[in-house]
Amino acid sequence: MAEPVDHKHLIDLLEAYLLGEEPSLTGNELASDVGIPFETARDRWRSLGFTAVGGDVPAFTHADLEALRLTQRLSELGFVEADDESALVRTLGRSFARLAEWQMRLLARMIDIDSMELDELRTIMDEVVPAVESLQNYVWRRHTLAVAARLLLAADEDDADPTGDQPGDREGEVVGVGFADIVNYTRQSRSLSRKELGHLVDSFEARALEIIGAHDGRIIKTIGDEILFVADDPESIARIGLELIEERLRDEDFPELRVGLAWGPALARLGDILGPVVNVASRLTSTSRPGRVLVDRALAEQLKDNEHFKLRRLRRTSVRGYRKLEPWSLRRPADEDPEVTDDGSMPGPASSFLHEQRKGLFRGADETRPAGEGPAGGEDVD
């Protein structure tokens, strides 16, 4: 059996392997070579998520020098404005830190460092590292193409806009924003094993990605038990919301969800999306019942003449930041309700909704609204 590997020595070997050499350059030398103040170089290093070191410490390699040259070149080309530089570098660092964490944990499952010869480890790394680098580069290029196509198509639609704004220059684009939240996630996380909890989240994210992508939507981010997604037209965001809650009826491994959708201007920034419409969608999700989709008034207005959806105005509610939020329940017409079993004996969300209404089982946000705000229990919009 091989002698246990000294882990500190292994770290040194990995550093030389991944960066091409052992550290020999100081921060002052890097900054001087690129022609920027050391403070600027240090701030970029920190923004990437790395621990800052003194200017005279030989902690860097020529790979670090090349990376600093590239960031400076992008800044000189005007690709990154001064106000956005720190945020862009920070986002890159945060994204790749999460990716690296996940990838290294996957690698740790297939190797036992203490029982493996260094030559064996190098052979594995020689296979894994180039493959992962190539895959990441391919995925980035594919996503870049998709984003470029979307922005160019949006520019075509805006040619008649007298403001002459270009994609990315506007304060906000009108989009549909949605949140989907796993019901009882906190309680489940206490009772499930780590493997079971991982399977639950993986199943949720994988199938949600398929549903959202099928309707030209985009996942902005996942936050454990919750996903934030967007779509560029009202029908797409509505179909995504309904299909997400319906998936539970088709696959018992898929978690039960609550969904909130909103429509309005939002600001896309560094892969995230900002604006009141995001807050509204989040608040609607928090007030939605399990297996239900709530939408705001703006989205309801966009969908009210669409025969593929049924809308029902609910009692106004007070949530953090919004004293009189007006939620609307979104469902399919009964004749479009998905049949979950071959004989149709198990009802889908729309027919379940109608059944609960008749039996008086649906409570909470659907209860009678205050006097003067319309018929008791809300009103259907055909």
Image: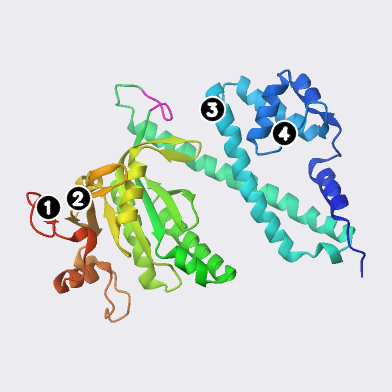
**Residue on which disc 3 sits:** 84
For the point 30% across and 62% down, the residue is 289
Mark 3 or 1, which is nearer the eye?
A: 1
Residue 192: tell me if it is visible: yes
Q: Which mark is residue 370?
A: 1
Examine the image and state in which quarter residue 341 appears.
bottom left
- In the picture shown, does residue 359 fall above or below 122? below
At numbered mark 1, what does the secondary structure look like: helix, strand or loop? Answer: loop
Q: CA distance from mark 1 to mark 2?
A: 8 Å
Horizontal side, residue 359 vs residue 288: left or right: left
Looking at the rendered image, the disc whose residue lies closer to the viewer, 4 or 3, is 4
Q: Amino acid at mark 2?
A: Arg
On the question of residue 217 being in view, the answer is no
Looking at the rendering, which quadrant does residue 279 occupy? Answer: top left
What is the total number of numbered labels drawn onto the structure image? 4
| Secondary structure found at label 2 | loop
Question: CB under 8 Å between callouts 1 and 2?
Answer: yes
What residue type is disc 3 on?
Answer: Asp
Q: Which residues are magenta?
A: 165-170
Q: Earlier in the sequence, mark 3 or mark 1?
A: 3
Q: Name the spot of residue 336 as percent of width and height, x first.
A: 23, 66
The quadrant in which the N terminus is found is: bottom right
SS majority, magenta:
loop
Gap in Å between the C-alphas at discs 4 and 2?
51 Å
